[in-house]
Image (cartoon, coloured by chain):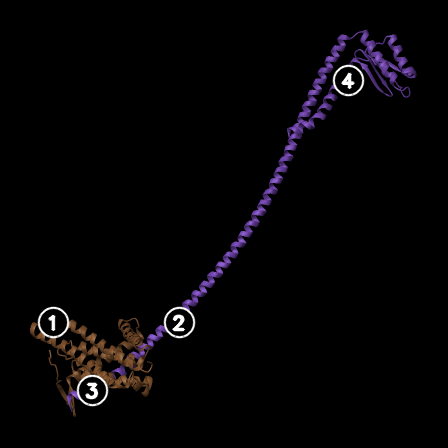
Chain colours: A brown, B purple
Amino acid sequence: MNLRIFGDPILFQLGPIPITETMVTSAVVTVILLAVAILMRSLVRSWPQHWLSVLAFLVVESFDNLVEEIVGRRHALVATFAGSMFLFIAFCNIAGQLPGVHPATGNLATTSALAAVVFLSVPIAGIQSNGLWGYIKHYFRPNPLLMPLHVISELSRTLALAVRLFGNIMSGHLLVGLLVALAGFLVPTPIMALDLLIGLLQAYIFSILSTVYIGAAISAGEE
Amino acid sequence: MSPTLTTFLFEAANFLVLAAVLGWLFFKPVRRALADRREKFESDNRQAAQKLAEAEKTQQEINETRAKLQAELNEMRTREMETARQQADQILREARSAAAREREMSHRLAAQMSGTQRDILAEVSAAAAADTVGRLLRQIGGPALQSALVASACEQLRSLPQDGVAPVKVESSQPLSPDQLASLKNALGAAADTADFRTVDGLGDGVRVSTGKGLIDASVGGLVQFASQSLVKEMSNRANSQQPMQSIQDA
């Protein structure tokens, strides 16, 4: 078990660019995820009754309904964003259960990058939905004096997104690693199952919060 | 270049690329498949609803046709029952009529048989009565009876008109006495000249006179025969006058 809290080993250099272990893990997870997605797509077309097709229908329909409940209407782009976020984080967290694999979401840079993407997506969705002034206007509501608080709120929730996911995944992975080191292979199994559950839960929370933030930005002008 | 910054940028770019590719490769096709399936289900539902409506319409038509047929059937049944009732009444009337005719015929036959028996009885009674009267007259017989019968014949001859009495034939079973002969000739008047007096058997006492105006039988045989005929005639007259009422009462 590769135990670390901060820091990311550089596996090799690609010119001036260092390739870290987290980058490789993320890339592998991405490839696997894409392969599974392609498999599901072909199954959906050729064999809709297959359980993977049903799972694909379930995932897509669930996120479409989730976005509809939060935003108030169906929004394919937001649903795709939230679904991709959930799948990526969930696959990264599941990958962390494999021996010798450090989860990409156990790295603060990864969670910060995902939080930053959400942070940037919020104004983009808001401006796309309400226009530039329609989106900026909501920073001055109910009082223009509260604009700094709005900005601080957005920054802090982005930071919270990143740190929450990082803290949960890193702590779970660390706990399992310590138990494996101290008590052998079978004792940490319940903790590993719990860690797996927490990983899926955190993926769901991250994608839900992302949807809520983006949905709030989309419906900001309507308020 | 800092590894942390590199990782940060890579992860951000990696996720954006992943989201774009997933949206293109996974979410969009699956969403389209879902929409197709939903549309297919809705189409199937519409078709099912349409077929259900058609089935209900057909069912309604069948029910209407059935009701119409039932009404026609009831009407035909009523009509046939009425016809059958009329036929039954007709047959009953005919049967009653035939029974009445049969009964009438039976009554007539019975009456005929009764009449025949009555006639036989009358003839037997008449024969018995004639025999009794004949025996009585023969027991009474003698000159006095002979004289009385001749006097009776004379009386009847006198009551006849004198014209067309001849020819006269006077028959008796025994020769007439001169007085009796004279009385007869006197009663005959002019016709006595051509009268034929003869003696025949079977008459008994008395005489039988045949004239142009008719037969005057004042003999015991004639009286017996007259009594017999009178009795038969009287019984027939009485039977004919009473039988219809009796038949009606029997009926």
**Along the polypeptide, which appears first: circle 2 or circle 3?**
3
Q: At which x and y percent is residue B138?
A: 76, 9
Q: Residue at x 18, y 72 (%)?
A: A197
Q: CA distance from mark 2 to mark 4?
A: 124 Å
- What residue did someone put label 3 on? B10
Which amino acid is tagged 4?
Phe
Which amino acid is tagged 2?
Ser
Front-most of residues B108 and B196: B108
Q: At which x and y percent is residue A86?
A: 23, 78
Q: Nearer the viewer, mark 2 or mark 3?
A: 3
Q: CA distance from mark 1 to mark 3?
A: 33 Å
Q: Residues within 10 Å of mark 2 (few under 14, many from 20)?
A: few
Which amino acid is tagged 3?
Phe
In the displayed structure, B206 sits above or below A14; it is: above
Quadrant assignment for the N terminus of chain B: bottom left
Q: CA distance from mark 1 to mark 4?
A: 161 Å
- What residue did someone put label 4 on? B226
- Can you see residue B15? no
Dot 1 and dot 3 residues touching (CB under 8 Å): no
